[in-house]
Image (spheres, rainbow, N blue to C red):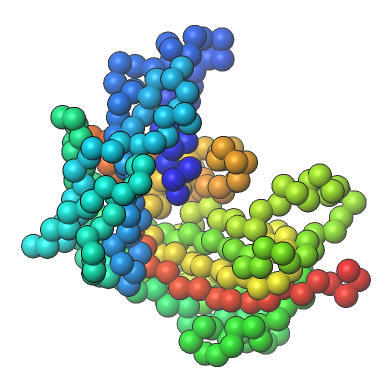
């Protein structure tokens, strides 16, 4: 998420600008020195670290200044509890020792102060999220070929599926949340590439990532079918489905569709029909970035190459 928020700070001042203008003219007087916050609370996980940085002028070489803000006062409150963060390395601020787990359906507030600046944000965490069923289904009839083990059911290594045979389907009871976000990760960095096509040459294979994420979606029917185009490698994988708060949901759906981080890793934002945003939706008063929350559940499976491979 750090690259995500970093680039959003740059994009908000570039949208709608003409290419021939002097870069220094693209920024208003308040465009530099704006606090950028980055913190994501996950239900039933410990309080997270908080990243604090600031925007700089267009000609300042942003990535050279990505050491962040080191003198901030960072506080998260929940009810009558106050958690004072301590500086870590670079822009990282760490929670107090033995910080409690993030609670479901709970309001958390963030306050950041630095050199006369103050940024505040609030998130209400979702309830606990549970994938109730997982299955391999026929991609035409949508009938169940066989059920898949969840982590709580048993050994997910038994979830062995041949690349592009059927679809992976997960079912859950929808929560009263703004929406959902999916991430997939290949767990074996040495596993074989499985996308074989005349349209993909050796150089292009090197561009395929082992981690990807989806656009925002509402998920009101409680069904997610995972497409194979998000998988490029054999071996063990994990799919994580996040039930996200409004802050998280609004940011990922308001990001321009062309967004990539500085390493070329593609985020797949954007989202709902009719959405057309000139500026990402930051729910941070006095700054930009994200202070969001989610609950998550996951399914593991093993991808097998097609027999012809």
Name the foreground residue: 87 vs 2.
Answer: 87
Residue at the extreme bottom: 154
Farthest residue, direction left? 80
Q: In this view, does 194 lie above or below 92?
A: below
- Give the image location of residue 5, x and y in percent: 42, 41
Quarter of image, res 239: bottom right
Residue 285 is at least partly visible in this image = no
Q: Which residue is drawn at 67% across and 79% down?
A: 136
Quick check: 173 left or right of 301?
A: left
Which residue reaches farthest front?
89
Q: Which residue is drawn at 67% across and 63% down?
A: 189
What residue is rendered at 13% in x and 58% in y? 82
Q: Position of residue 245 (x, y in %)?
A: 34, 58
* Quarter of the image that includes the C terminus: bottom right
Q: How many numbered discs?
A: 0
Residue 61's spot in the image, x, y percent?
Answer: 47, 23
* Residue 205, placed above or below residue 177: above
């Amino acid at each position: 998420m750090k690259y995500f928020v970093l680039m959003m700070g740059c994009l908000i001042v570039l949208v709608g600008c003409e290419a021939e203008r002097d870069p220094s003219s693209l920024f208003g007087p308040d465009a530099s020195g704006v606090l950028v916050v980055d913190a994501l609370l996950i239900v039933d996980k410990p309080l997270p670290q908080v990243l604090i940085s600031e925007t700089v002028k267009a000609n300042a070489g942003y990535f050279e200044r990505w050491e962040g803000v080191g003198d901030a006062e960072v506080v998260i409150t929940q009810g009558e509890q106050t958690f004072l963060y301590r500086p870590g390395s670079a822009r990282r601020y760490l929670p107090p020792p033995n910080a409690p787990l993030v609670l479901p359906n709970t309001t958390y507030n963030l306050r950041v102060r630095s050199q006369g600046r103050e940024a505040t944000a609030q998130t209400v965490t979702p309830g606990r999220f549970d994938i109730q069923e997982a299955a391999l289904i026929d991609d035409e009839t949508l009938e169940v070929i066989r059920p898949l083990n969840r982590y709580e059911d048993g050994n997910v290594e038994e979830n062995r599926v041949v690349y592009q045979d059927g679809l992976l389907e997960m079912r859950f009871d929808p929560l009263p949340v703004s929406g959902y976000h999916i991430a997939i990760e290949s767990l074996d960095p040495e596993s074989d590439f499985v996308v074989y096509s005349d349209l993909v040459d050796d150089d292009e294979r090197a561009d395929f990532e082992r981690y990807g994420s989806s656009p925002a979606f509402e998920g009101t029917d409680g069904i997610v079918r995972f497409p194979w185009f998000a998988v490029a490698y054999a071996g063990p994988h994990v799919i994580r489905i996040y039930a996200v708060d409004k802050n998280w949901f609004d940011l990922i759906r308001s990001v321009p569709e062309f967004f990539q981080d500085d390493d070329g890793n593609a985020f797949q934002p954007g989202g709902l029909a009719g959405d057309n945003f000139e500026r990402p939706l930051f729910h941070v008063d006095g700054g930009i970035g994200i202070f969001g929350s989610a609950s998550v559940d996951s399914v593991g499976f093993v991808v097998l190459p097609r027999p012809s491979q």
